[in-house]
Amino acid sequence: MTREHAQTLVRTAVLALGGNALARSDEPPTVTNQFRHARESVAPIVELARQGWRIVIVHGNGPQVGDELVRNESARKVVEPLPLGVLVAETAGWIGYMLQQSLQNALASARVQRDVATVITQTLVDRYDPALNQPTKPIGHSLSPQEAARIRDAGRAVGKDGSGEWRRMATSPQPLGVVEFPVIKRLLEQGTLVIAAGGGGPPVYQDPLLGLEGLDAVVDKDRVSAILASQLDAEVLMILTNVDAVFEGWGTPEAKPIRRMTVEQAEQMIAAGSLDAGGMKPKIEAAAGFVRRGGARAIIARLSEGPAALRGETGTTIARSP
């Protein structure tokens, strides 16, 4: 096999891991628990790395960045609180550290020689995006009605998520691109597994005088993953979460998984207005957008079933019409 032919066989996958994969709602979000889940979450990635895939890992930070806000508020009389945009960068750093270390150890155990690097990336957004005036993105853990009322009285946004739980809400502008994309591309070409756009990446806009300036918002990591996957001409976008698939009739006794969807069917589901704005809606929008822009396929599946979903055995695959 010639070198040129070998290069044509290299495939790129962008994997989007939900923040809930590390901090689960049914247990305390301790660092010990999150490290344990980080070790569990990288097992499917090792299999793809062994197969030679170029891989970018994008992780969420919804529970973690909400916890950081609580820590900031609790200590505000002792130290200066950090703004939300800075907290996004902070969580991207320590979650990236957990995933990077866990992946390095798992690759070594499997005798797969691939480097791993975490890159703190900035996500370009529109300073005048109307979404910056509408808090719709759930962050943090679920709140009791009393806690929600207290936070609302303090002037902070709260609302119910797709499960009917009270949560803090943050604004979430549409991503336009990843500032450090050239760095990510060079690392991939060297065979490095890259962790990037953590928590969606701290959002920034281009100021005509100052250059890049940060915003206090949270960009949806699935939407950023789709943009990055398109920029990289990736073959597949995998959105790995805590549900088995996209379900028809979600929340009803008749609910059933949808194994394959066309872009048109996905857009019809979005237009129907039955999807949670902070949950499944951005996942389907991101997946459909990636395929519409030329991607071969997008997959929404449970994290532990990533390789099986890539083979079409589980999850939901969104592809162009035959």
Image (cartoon, rainbow, N blue to C red):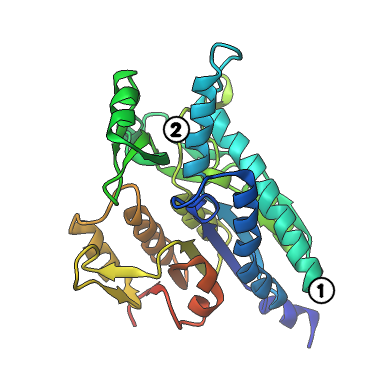
- Of residues 30 and 271, the one nearer the viewer is 30
Nearest the viewer among 101 and 212 is 101
Q: Which numbered disc, 2 or 1, marks the residue closer to the eye?
A: 1
Q: Identify the residue at image location x=58%, y=20%.
A: 210
Q: Position of residue 122 (x, y in %)?
A: 58, 39
Labelled pair 2, 1 in contact (Cβ < 8 Å)? no
Circle 1: element type: loop
Taking the image as shown, residue 266 lies to the left or right of residue 96, namely left
Give me the disc on residue 111: 1
From the viewer's perspective, tell me whether residue 215 is left or right of residue 113. Answer: left
Quadrant showing the N terminus: bottom right
Quarter of image, res 135 = top left
Percent across and percent down for residue 50 are 72, 76
Give the vertical position of 31 relative to 190 (above or below): above
Query: What is the x, y in percent for residue 110?
Result: 77, 73
Residue at 56% over, 18% down: 75
The type of residue carrying mark 1 is Arg
Mark sitting on residue 264: none
The residue under the point 68% across, 50% down is 98
- Identify the image quadrant of residue 175: top left
Tell me the residue that label 2 is attached to.
Answer: 217
Of labels 2 and 1, earlier in sequence is: 1
Residue located farthest toward the bottom when viewing the structure as drawn: 1
Label 2: few (<14), some (14–19) or many (≥20) C-alpha neighbours in 10 Å: many
